[in-house]
Image: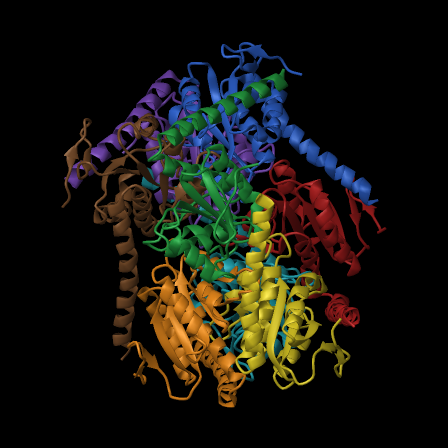
Chain colours: A brown, B blue, C purple, D red, E cyan, F green, G orange, H yellow
């Protein structure tokens, strides 16, 4: 379990006090099973985050409000996940000047191609840092957020170096397991 | 040339007084050469319209404001054209309950596939009536707007019947020209 | 269950008397499980509709006949759902001057990409208001039909405003549930 | 130039009397520059044809009428070329029991992918013999028509054998030219 | 079960004597579950056929031999089904001057898009009459073969007219069932 | 012209002293005409950058070396642009823990779809912040870099707020020009 | 089971002594179920191989090291399998001058289209011999490796001739089984 | 200019005597402008080759004959380039046991996507070593052929090491030019 505090409006934020803050926004509660990968990766780095459901289409004013106030509310990186005509990250990027990371969800008949293009093909001036479709993208959104926050946080830099070592060692361990399996 | 009146904010509206009103919104002035087909088709039906540039990403508040007030400002159908990660129609549909017609523009490397999917793959509850990519879609947006307005306008119904006859006769005329060419 | 009356030819129409009428046409009975979402959404708005199976390819004359007479038979909006080389909406639009809404079905190996392109890429002069692929598109066809009918129906306008509120509240409720789950 | 006779309705048919007859139908006069390849190939085989512009969407009744009567009017193979949401071949196949050959045109932003899928992905029971996109498909429609007619025409069988020899010799001749160029 | 006779090489042909003959060639035995739809449709029309597995890549000489001799062996239409880089129909068309119908199979990761393009995009001079991907295409290959054979067979023409009636009646029956279900 | 200083290896860096530093890496000199948009946007924000050609495939060791040392050499954000099987950003991300922004170039037959997928679909643990294809993506890479650097730079935050204002005013100005044109 | 010997670093190599050697590299242990097809096909030809997990992104230095030394370590052909933004084969080809065969894996939402394009669209000068997506490609990588090694190995040439015979006979056997099934 | 000798059938082969030999086969003379890149790259490595036009569809017997005899005629690597439904490499691979390298040409409306899939998606047992679409693939076919031949040719190994150095130096030179341009 992770630490949770209450925001003014009842939203619970999972945070250690005084750490950088990331928002993980989803367009639908059905995205949670995928975006859990993002939140768990943030936790592994000890980066606090807040998880929220906000919809570009169904709660556009709340989304605009959230994005417009994100910086003054202490957020530093905004992660937005949505499927199909995935406008969520783009709408947030339109209202905020913080780095916005978009994660395309593989929902619907087109399996995320629509969400990828709707997220990545932004017009000049309004970038969305787009991740791959689905769980890999969800995890990578967390790592990118950490890389951004690490620019002014030595302890995160150290964790990122360890993360690279862990990735390498995981490959080596799996290779060893495969070799054993081949005997 | 067509009749133009001044709105409060200096936007000129091309309208006959007391007729139904359509808004033609473009995400960029580079869409005008294509969307001119839409405005001209509306004029042929005698339907007044207002043309505006509004961007889901660069002027999101004005866009939301426009969409939220469109109905009370007397609009009945909203046409939105945009390219790439084309969020314009979707954002307008999020704020308005009027019928929203989306026209994907063929800008950028993907030639409108991105704009098509970003426009059509809307989540349940927030429809965008999506047209084909480019000039054909631009013209069809006008015809669909007329078909919608015609439900309560007998004179437009008559014009639509004439439109169908014109289309048929144009095919016949082109066939005759081809036959002559073949002699 | 909902109220059903008998048409002349035995087709049952689900309608309150004296309300605007929508036709929901499917190319195949296998589309019903998806298009049920459309009919149910119409019912929630209290808009009467008639459901029919008509095929552009297997019963082309009946389809043309239906479309040609749709207006005089009192229909105001025609919704057509089909998969693969989905010509149904296009054929209906060729014969009728009413607004035609097309819903691409995700049947067959291409999962609806074929149906989407066959429905949306209409030639100039004959629009089809195309929805997203599958259930989301099915529901949105209903909402668009209601938005069109609402132009001359104050009570539907009120329901659409409520619909927007419902969508927003549903997002908020799901957000609250997620927050509770995260504790 | 080729021989032309007048049909009842003024359409000129390019035919030798008493030979099998092919119809080449185009959705638009802009398809002619491509479909000329088809007509010229038919002429090389001495197969008479009639060229017509008919639109599935703009002249649907004439198209249905033409297709319904094609067999009694002496046609044996129907070739239909169209672009975008290319319904022409499908609509003709819905009304006729003759072999229908579809040629997708590369018009519009999607360069014929839409036309290919709209033509080939027909539902069970109503085939369209689909050719490749553009000029190659146009020529092949003619060759397929000849192959079909040749089943009951020995002289066409002989020409098809010669056609295969010509193709081979053309490859050999081009190879020789290339070798000379390489010296 | 259907009537089977023995060919010289042990291949059994399902045929009534003295009727036109169709070959149904598959690249792999795994295509049989789909191509059964083709053979059954041919049987319903009383058209004899022979089913064979031949591979463009694994038994290229037998395939070339078969195609080269198909006409002299009394075949009139050749149907070829294959998946992935589906060369089977193209290779057969290269060696035979009979009408060749190609059916793309939905095998492998790309679900038939590869097979469709490999089958349909033939170079000028060598057509393959391409059907839709999978079971619908398999059935339509049979119907197209019948349409071709019917050009010189009045009884097949009659069956095709009945086929069109059956398709229409099947739609009407399904519509009636749906109406009953809706009560 | 902008200020240039000499690095140890002769590479010139365009930088104001003591400001954050961005590297703009291109896989080929042919990418320069597009990536100039990136460098110019960085300059407008007063952010120094270094431009280099490095290839994941042709100079892999230099690329790995550059990426591995980027942080100790004082870089904070790495922008990598490449076309086709665009591995450049991925390879840099494999060796560096800094935020890596990838810009897919529209070179070759597939017009950037290959580059987009090769850049964005990274495995879990190694993110690349992917921008849209071509010039829009090039400019957005700069803006995202600025947004990242602004997290610890108040003056950049101010410039980003101005940037949003500029975007909005540019839309308004273009709207005004359009209105004038329509009179 | 097959013979395994120990390499210096504990990796087990499946080899007959004194035979040519192939490396089968996978980006992830999840690729093993597919790449087993490759290893088994190599074994059937009696070609020794070594299987390893190495990641272009998670263990880039080991991958570069392995590729750089592959030739001096006695490898002759390198097979690399990866999914998504599949850089593995490309990175190996950047560091080695041996023939590199790439096998795209069908992992993730895009089912291998991303892996195919990331593997095949290499820049001029650095080829990757790309196979089809998934199991067919895995097996074919082995056959291509054998074809390459056979250029200087008469016994492998003989086995390849037998392989072609086996393929043909397998087709014939399946045809016979089908004929029996049809009785 | 390069050395040319005459083959028995008048085909000129560009070769130094006693060196390994490569065949470069094209489906059409229109492929020559692209495949010249392949032949020139082979020449730079001093590898002799023979260029021929052979068509899988228009001269299938010659193609089969050529492929069947390629090994006994002293060829070691076969390169095949074709566009659209590109069967050439696959047909050659069906008849030969030599390594076959396929180069998809970007001809026709689909710009080489069809040729890529038709070339790469080969069934198990019959590999085609597929290169990227167009000129890059043409050049890479040559390099891969050299890598294959180099396995038993020390002088080619040396040239390949030089090739890697040249690639790296070319990148460095272009970087230097860019730096000069930026001053």
Residue B169: quarter of image: top right
Q: Give the residue displayed 39% in from the left and 62% down from the top.
A: G56
In this picture, is C21 found above or below H145? above
Foreground: G12 or G118?
G12
Foreground: A179 or C7?
A179
Relative side of A138 to E70, left or right: left
Q: Position of residue E147 (x, y in %)?
A: 60, 58
Foreground: D118 or C74?
D118
In this picture, is H170 found above or below F76? below
Quadrant where the image shows the C terminus of chain H = top right
Quadrant where the image shows the N terminus of chain H = bottom right
Residue A115: quarter of image: top left
In this picture, is A48 found above or below B156? below
Relative side of B114 to F149, left or right: right
Question: How many marks are shown on the rendered structure?
Answer: 0
Foreground: E115 or A115?
A115
For the question of whether residue F36 can be seen, the reply is yes
In this picture, is G70 found above or below C101? below
Q: Position of residue C25 (x, y in %)?
A: 44, 38
Residue D86: quarter of image: top right
For the question of whether residue E146 can be seen, the reply is no
Q: Position of residue C106 (x, y in %)?
A: 42, 48
Relative side of B23 to B179, left or right: left
Q: Position of residue F105 (x, y in %)?
A: 53, 48
């Amino acid at each position: 379990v992770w630490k949770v505090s209450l925001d003014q409006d009842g939203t619970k934020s999972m945070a250690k006090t005084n750490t950088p803050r990331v928002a993980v926004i989803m367009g639908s509660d059905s995205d949670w099973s995928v975006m859990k990968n993002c939140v768990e990766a943030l936790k592994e780095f000890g980066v606090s985050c807040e998880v929220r459901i906000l919809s570009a289409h169904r709660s556009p004013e709340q989304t605009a409000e959230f994005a417009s106030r994100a910086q003054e509310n202490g957020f530093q990186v905004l992660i937005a996940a949505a499927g199909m005509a995935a406008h969520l990250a783009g709408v947030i990027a339109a209202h905020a000047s913080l780095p916005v990371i978009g994660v395309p969800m593989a929902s619907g008949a087109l399996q995320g191609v629509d969400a990828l293009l709707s997220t990545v093909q932004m017009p000049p001036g309004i970038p969305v840092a787009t991740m791959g479709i689905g769980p890999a993208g969800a995890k990578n959104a967390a790592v990118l957020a950490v890389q951004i926050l690490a620019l002014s946080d030595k302890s995160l830099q150290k964790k990122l170096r360890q993360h690279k070592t862990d990735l390498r060692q995981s490959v080596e361990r799996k290779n060893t397991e495969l070799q054993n399996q081949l005997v």
